[in-house]
Image (spheres, helix red, strand yellow):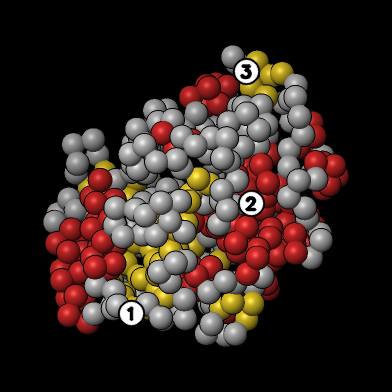
Amino acid sequence: MATIESSAISGLKSQIDKVTSDPNGAGGIVYCAVNKNGDLIFEHASGNLGKGRPEPMTADTVFWIASCTKMIVGIACMQLVEQGKLALDDVELVEKIAPELKAVQVLENGKLVPKKRGITLRMLLAHTAGFGYSFFNKGLNDYYGAIGLEEFTGNEFDILSQPLVNQPGSRWEYGINIDWAGILVERVSGLSLNDYFQKNIFKPMGLQNISFFPTDHMKQNLAYMHARAPNGNLSVRPAGHLLRKPLTARTAEEINSTFNSGGGGCFATPADYCQIIATLLNDGVHAKSGHRILKKETIDQMFTNQIPEFPDFGRQGIQPPKEDLSNPLPELYPQGDLPQGWGLTFFLHQHPGPTGRSGTTGWWAGLPNLFWWADRENGLGGIIASQILPFGDGQVMGLWGAVEAGLYQALKK
């Protein structure tokens, strides 16, 4: 069972404190590491809920985890695959559940053209179905003209109305694919995605601080959203939170009219999220509760490269049209010339990584600079959580790698 040398803990905490104490560092960070038994072998809350705020970050601080939600959708989909209610490669089933995916067209050179093949659940989970994101894809952003497009309104229309930006199966592109996977879960189960998660994943594991609709207690512990200016200055985001609608929905009518975004709608404490990571590490069983959420062979499948035909998918580079949401990204994760892989909702390391990760590691991120990883071989995973826009923040990413490397160095042999 992965544990770390106690002598290393103070040094790791100091690294985090150094970044949060800098006036233009990171404001506040929570960093947690977990083993497959669900033990938090490292946890540190540093800084404050918001720059200039008196309230400290704590282990109870709640973050909008954004695209870290996608991995949970993958779990939900694969539960339904195990039950025979969904299938990874059945176009007809997808189109029966979601006729919109039969009718959707492809945006090419500013015009819509028919798609050449059907969309599968595997394509949605592997980001090869053809959908994009307006904050990464200039063509998609331009298509909406003066009206504009924004994926964080909490309105279903802003997801369901989008065309494809690639022919299905033709390339990997990050986008609303997993929002559509979440819609399939809802329609097959008859539950909202939040209710499905709570019933089939969170409550069986005893998780109380993770939801699409934070409780009043969670909102009291909500971290402030920050913005980093091009000159590096950090401030609390003047416009407030990016994902407002689920935070302000109170009545049943307001909640029911809010889109449950499988692509990025969850709020959580890092500690609760780590319990889900631990379940991936432990071959589908949540050790603390004894609850099995997926079969081992299903976890194996999730950690298998789904796109061997695109070994350089993460080297495409991104020139974002909305620079308040994302920095330009030359690569998703520098790996030299090693081939890259993508599992069922997350990036795969198929070779040992620079921090000490094994070649059986999955990871992904959330827009306001959160990064999680799950290393099955070493039985170690975790998350660094911040609330800073735009994505690709050098301060947070540098700290993520440095502390992760320190954790691997401190692993007890």
* Number of the front mark, 3 or 2: 3
Give the residue number, with chain letter if any, for mark 1: 3
Three-letter code, disc 2: Phe
SS at badge 2: loop
List x then y, in percent, for residue 389: 34, 45
For marks 2 and 1, give the CA distance.
Answer: 40 Å
Q: In the rendering, at what x and y percent does residue 118 appear?
A: 77, 34
- How far, Cα to Cα, is label 3 from label 1? 51 Å
Q: Give the percent coordinates (x, y) of residue 265.
A: 54, 55
Near mark 3 (Cα within 10 A), the count class, few <14, some 14-19 or many ≥20, is some
Picture quarter containing residue 52?
bottom left
Q: Which residue lies under the disc numbered 3?
A: 108
Furthest-bottom residue in view? Answer: 289
From the viewer's perspective, tell me whether residue 296 is left or right of residue 115.
left
Q: Quadrant of residue 187?
A: bottom right
Q: Earlier in the sequence, mark 3 or mark 1?
A: 1
Residue under the image location 60 percent in, 72 percent down: 284
How crowded pointer 1 is (Cα within 10 Å; few <14, some 14-19, many 20+) is rated as many
Marks 3 and 2, how far apart at CA? 28 Å
Q: Nearer the viewer, mark 2 or mark 1?
A: 1
Determine contact: label 3, label 1, CB under 8 Å: no
Q: Which residue in the structure is indicated by mark 2?
A: 259
Q: Quadrant of the C terminus?
A: bottom left
Does 353 sit above or below residue 327? below
- Taking the image as shown, residue 360 lies to the left or right of residue 252, namely left
Q: Residue at x 65, y 63 (%)?
A: 298
Task: Tell me the SS state at disc 3.
Answer: strand
**Looking at numbered disc 1 in the image, what kind of residue is underneath it?**
Thr
Which residue is nearer to you in this view: 410 or 64? Answer: 410
Residue type at tag 3: Glu
In the rendering, which numbered label is found on residue 113? none
Give x and y (percent) for residue 121: 71, 47
